[in-house]
Amino acid sequence: MSAPRILLASGALATAAALGVLWLAGGQPRGLVTGAAVAQQPPAARQPLYYQAPSGTDFSPAPKKDEQGRDYVPVYEEGDQTPAASAAPPASPARPPLYYQDPSGRPEYSAVPRKSADGRGFVPVYEDAGAPGPAPAPAPSSAGGRGRILYYRNPMGLPDTSPVPKKDSMGMDYIPVYEDEANQPAGTVTVSPERVQMLGVRTALATERTMTRSIRAVGTIAVDERRLVVVSPRFEGWIQRLLVNETGQPVRRGQPLFEVYSPDLALAEQEYVVARRLDAGVAAAALARLRNFDLPEEEVARLRRTGTVARTLTLTSPMDGVVLEKAALQGMRFAPGETLFRIGDLSTVWLLADVFEQDLGLVGPGQEASIGLTAYPDRRFTGKVTFVYPTLNAATRTARVRIEILNPEQLLKPDMYATVEIAAPLGSTPMVAVPDSAVLDSGTRQAVLVERAPGRYEPRSVQTGRRADGLVEIRQGIKAGERVVVGANFLIDAESNLRAALQTFAAPPAPTQQEGQRP
């Protein structure tokens, strides 16, 4: 005899014995109800004959579960049917349910068939919209073309997933992972449009450009050494009359500065006049002596023309400029080589800037410079680097750089304090660059967030290069035209646990073991 028949026979004997006891006690048997009593008897009072495994290969006289935690199915007399069976029919093998939901509509789900606290079976939810199930069941796919939901991941980024909707220990909903997200590069994060707007996410394009770095330094204004002269007679004498007697007074080329009397110069002129009458060779020697005294050519021409010796000599300014120093005084005696006037041309001045050693490799002649002075805070002056001095200050670790500046208005004065920015190009070929705020730097790895679609961001490791004026060179990792996150990238990192993604760049873990299943 087969197992079902044996069980059926034994169940029938047990039922008969129970009925006999009840009959003797004056009670009514519960197992056998026929006729009109069947319609009046509550279905919940019916007793099954035995219980069959969901797979159909095992039987039991009492309720039990199989190895996967599923309840054995009760088997009744022919025509009988349990409310649970009618409420939750077994799913067809060709159309398995996605999950099971509490029949009351509460946010409680299960991956396997189970019963609620009041004994009702959980309602299966199928992939197609026509499947049975209450209206509050969550949709397994999105309407935005994101594909079906594969699983749900922990909202805090922990390595925990679930095949059905659930909440974590803090009551936060698990985040659905859609089919199209699973096909994205590892670590790609999706943020809702509302969250993007709330975080203030900003993006910028990676572009090819020639980068220029601003070298900042400080310095002082100095006189152009090529436009500086001194008036220092080569003979001894006395200042008879001072014609320019103020420091800072502007002078023109050939303008008289002072009149001098010199016995040595007068004697040399007398010798020349006499030598012209006696001997041409002696006259030439006397003329050479006068020129050694740096006698002006105008005075030599007058001496040849008139043949008379002047008692005083007028010395003039050798160039246009400003009297920077004046040592000459009315009636003073001066010695040969003594400086009486120092005159400078301030139409062009120098800025001697101290550039740090680390920036010297980027500075060279011909580069443009922007100069600011505390005396003129609302104005900017321009200049050009003309020379980098060959020595370094060991104490300050700086080298001096000369910048030439036009000064037609005479606004720039020697020893003025100035700040300078030198535009130093970083190479002659264009390079891919992004704003430096786009780079997430952990110290050992640099990465950026690439926007693959609105609200979808991929962390990508990059190799950075030189930095200049808020930009950083990207040597490897992204291409020109890709859009990167430049604002709120750290907030995105905190929101979607990008820290773990940036450290491992690993694919999301596979769904964990289904609830209720035994290993």
Image: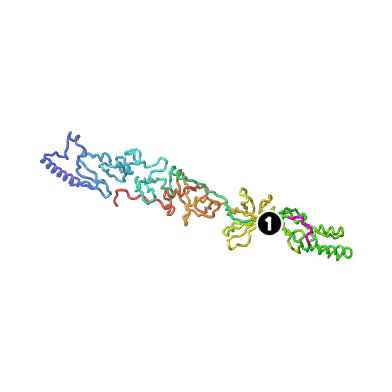
Residue 231, image x, y percentages = 74, 59
Compared to residue 143, the image places residue 502 above or below, namely below
Residue 173, image x, y percentages = 36, 45
Q: Relative to residue 509, is residue 338 drawn left or right?
A: right
Q: Is residue 10 magenta?
A: no
Q: Which residue, as the protein is rendered here, is positioned at the far top? A: 36
Q: Is residue 370 visible?
A: no
Q: Which residue, as the protein is rendered here, is positioned at the far right? A: 278
Q: Nearer the viewer, residue 222 or 15?
A: 222
Compared to residue 324, the image places residue 83 above or below, namely above
Residue 213, image x, y percentages = 57, 53
Residue tagged by mark 1? 224
Q: Quadrant of residue 229?
A: bottom right
Task: Give the amino acid type for the residue marked by disc 1 in the picture.
Answer: Asp
State the extent of the magenta-drawn residues as a range: 238-245
Compared to residue 341, the image places residue 70 above or below, namely above
